[in-house]
Image (cartoon, rainbow, N blue to C red):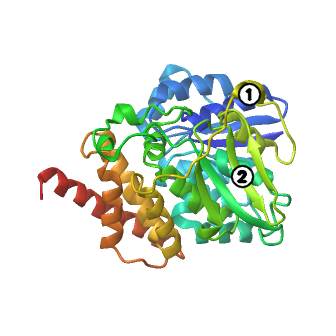
Amino acid sequence: MQRISLLGATGSVGRSTLEVIALNPERYQVYALTGHSRMDQLALLCSQFHPQKVVVADGQQREYLRQCGAVDAATQILVGREGLIEVAVDPCVDTVMAAIVGAAGLEPTLAAVCAGKRVLLANKEALVMSGDLFMQSVRQSAARLLPVDSEHSAIFQCLAQPGRSLHEQGVEKLVLTGSGGPFRTLSKAALAQVTPAMAVRHPRWSMGPKISVDSATLMNKGLELIEACWLFDAAPEAIEIWIHPQSIVHSLVRYQDGSTLAQLGYPDMRTPIAVALAWPERIVAGVAPLDLLTTGTLEFEAPDRERFPCLDLARQAMAAGGSAPTLLNAANEVAVQAFLQNETPFSAIPAIIAATLDRLPVSATATLEQVIEADRQARQVAGRLIHQHRAGI
């Protein structure tokens, strides 16, 4: 029986994780749930899974959970950053699902790693922001790190011996696939007219607004490239990105002997979640088996780097090293939030990121404090750029 702390229970990955857990009650017990804003959903999840600990953002939310009767008197309700870290390192917990979106997930995820937990990583920003520090902590603590992003899970499944280097396994290239997002065929002029409502309607996946916008700009693929570099100890030039509109082939591994292995399945996050939960075993995930006879044609194409410059920005940041990926991630989060709030156009997102990177020097990020400081500086600069854009400066 694995006891699980689920960080980000009300998001799409969190809800899918709980669906898989519900199908396998003899194997998994929900020990802690965390949520930041959707208190009605968190209350329902507490009523269903009866966690021993719950983490919310503030005292008002804690009072709401108490008054609505979602938890009993024995349930501990913790608050804020300290609460997240507490449930991430709790000695009663075996496995931590890191599904908080964005930079907010870094500290509790890193804490879980340092505590030697089995960490299921859905929060790619943790690796993007602090890849070197993060992977050093994995090695020093002997934590087990398992990818949950569908692309990285696919690569993990296609590797013969995931713990060995790519060179030792005879790997030539890693190929990350992506649907291309909702604007794959739009012209550059049409991209300038995109609205938030259009951007959050992903053609294949059901995701939150931030990740949906990242998919629309292809920054999601850029962040996944950085994540893959750290997860699999790969150079950026050893990773290709292919657009695959059907989202059936989730990624590929090309070997030196001419073989290419791929992992296929319907676009459903419950599959990579189940892989990470049960590895090295397999469990029921509630996902139908893939029927290739009715799937039809599988298409692949190279991404248009001119219309979607975020891909090159991510490659350049990874190549620069140090704080560059941290700056990239922070500027992207600020720019995406501004777009979702109708404060800046869709086409300005990569421009804000590029300008932020130009204005800040790349520095070392050997400590968590240095990572947080780089993140703070980039958010400040990106916010200033957005203000100047709105003011017409």
The quadrant the C terminus occupies is bottom left
**Is 282 in front, or is 178?**
178
Image coordinates for residue 230, horizontal then vertical, percent: 64, 65
Q: Residues within 10 Å of mark 2 (few under 14, many from 20)?
A: many
| Visible residue check, residue 71 | no
Location of mark 1 (residue): 287
Residue at x-position 12% and y-position 52%: 391
Q: Amino acid at mark 1?
A: Val
Alpha-carbon distance for marks 2 and 1?
A: 21 Å
Q: Quadrant of residue 130?
A: bottom right
Q: Residue furthest left?
A: 392
Q: Amino acid at mark 2?
A: Leu
Residue at x-position 17% and y-position 57%: 388
**Is 333 in front, or is 133?**
333
In the displayed structure, does residue 243 sit left or right of residue 96? left
In the displayed structure, does residue 192 sit left or right of residue 216? left
Location of mark 2 (residue): 252
Q: Residues within 10 Å of mark 1 (few under 14, many from 20)?
A: some
Residue at x-position 61% and y-position 31%: 15
**Image: 136 above or below 344:** below
